[in-house]
Amino acid sequence: MSWDKLGPFNPPAQASTELQESLYFQSYGRLETHMSLLQDSVRTQAFRNAILRNRQHFQGKIVLDVGCGTGILSLFAAEAGARRVIGVEYTDMAEVAREIVRDNEKADVVTVVQGLVEQVELPDGIQQVDVIVSEWMGHGLYMEAMLNSVLYARDKWLCRGGLILPSVGTLWLVGAHDSHRKANLNFWHSVEGIDMSCVRKPVSQEPVVDCVTIQQVLTDECYLHSTHLDSARNEPVAFRSNFLLTVQRSGVINLLVLYFDVGFPQGDSPVPLKLSTSPLSPWTHWEQTLLYLDEPLFVKANDRVRGVLAMMPDGRDGRCMIFDLNISFRSARTRVESFKSFSSSGSR
C-alpha cells in the first residue's frame, strides 16, 4: 500500500509534479535550510579543501557553480584564483548570494544568475567554462535529481578536458539494527484509544533519513552503484544491483542502510579527496537513508545476506526514488519489499 492510495486526492501527474517542484524549491529558498548546510562543517570543509587543493585548475579559469545557494562554493573558487565565476541559483536566495559576494568584495569575479540551469544563458556571451562545481547530492545520493542539472550544464558548457567537482559519487549498503523500530511502529495500533494501524504499513515503506551509530552496524559494506560525472549520460538514474553482506557479529538485522561517498581530484595526487556519509565517518547533514525490513533477520557472525536492490525515479515526481528490495537469507523464501521516498523535505 502506498500513500497515494490512502485518500481521495489524486491530482493529475503534471499538477503533482508542479506541486513537488514548488515545494522543493521553496525549501531551498529559506535561510534556515542553508544555515543547516553551512553548519555541516564536514561537507563545507571538504568542498573548500577540494577547490583549494586544485588551484592549478582554477587559476585564471571560468567556473560554473550549479545551484549556488548562498554562493559559498563560488567564493571558494574565487579564492582559488578563478578569473570568472558564474553561480546559477533558481530561488530568491540568488539575491542573498549577490549581497554576500558584494560584502566579500568579489563582485568583480563572481556573478550570480537567477534561474534554472536548464533555462538560463551565461552572462557576457560566455560559451564555455573550465570547471563545474556543485553540491548536487541528495539523501541516498540520488534523491532530489539535481545530478541531472549538473550533467546538463556539463554537456552544454564544459570545455573538453574540463573539471567537475565532485567527479564521482558511489552508493554503499550495510546491515544494521535499530532497537526502537518496533515500538515506533506499534504506536499506530492505539493512538489515544483510536486504531490507526492502517497507517503502519505505509509508514514502514518510507525510507527514513536518520543517523546510524557504529554500534548499530552488523555487516561489512557492499558497493551498489556509482556515477562518474565526466562520462555519465544525462538520464534518470535507475539501476538494479546484486549485493552480498557478510555479518561481522551476531545480532538482529532489521534495517539496511544506504550511504554514499563522493570523490574529488586532489591536485596531482592519485588519491582523491573523499567526502563520506558512512556510519563509520563523522556526521553530515545527509546522515544515512534507512530501509526498514518487515521481518528481522536473526544473524550470527560470518552469515551472509544476499539480495538485489533496485532504485528508480517515481514516475509522478522525478525527485522521489522508489526502491525494490529482494533478500535471500539461509535458503528461506526470497523476501520482496518496496519503499518510496518523498522529496521537498529541504533537509539536504
Image (spheres, rainbow, N blue to C red):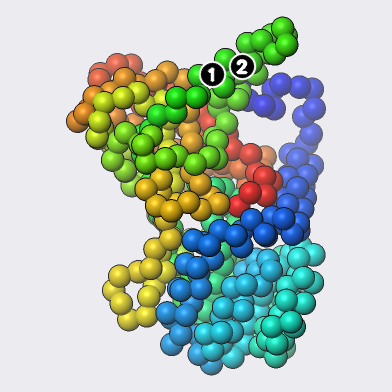
Q: Which residue is mark 2?
A: 187
Q: Is residue 114 left or right of residue 44?
A: right
Residue at the spot of label 1? 183
Say if residue 231 shows up in the picture.
no
Could you tell whether 341 is left or right of 5 in the image? left
Left or right placement of residue 34 versus residue 218 in this view: right
Q: Is residue 281 above or below residue 113?
A: above
Looking at the rendered structure, the secondary structure element under dot 2 is: helix
Question: How busy is the neighbourhood of tag 2: few (under 14 within 10 Å), some, or many (20 plus)?
Answer: few
Horizontally, is 223 left or right of 346 in the view? left
Query: Looking at the image, which is closer to me, 150 or 199?
Result: 199
* Residue 71 image position (x, y, % from top left): 66, 72
Can you say whether 154 is above or below 221 in the image?
below
Amino acid type of disc 1? Ala
Q: Residue at x 65, y 69 (%)?
A: 68
Q: Are marks 2 and 1 in contact (CB under 8 Å)?
A: yes
Identify the residue shown where x is 51% and y is 53%: 284
Q: For this rendering, which residue is in front, 158 or 200?
A: 200
| Residue type for callout 2 | Phe
Which secondary structure lies at badge 1? helix
Residue 32 percent location from the top left of the image = 72, 55
The label shown at residue 44 is none
Q: CA distance from mark 2 to mark 1?
A: 6 Å
Which residue is more in the foreground, 113 or 178? 178
Q: Residue 208 appears in which quarter of the rendering? A: top right
Residue at point 48% right, 51% down? 283
Q: Where is the N terminus found, in terms of image quarters? A: top right
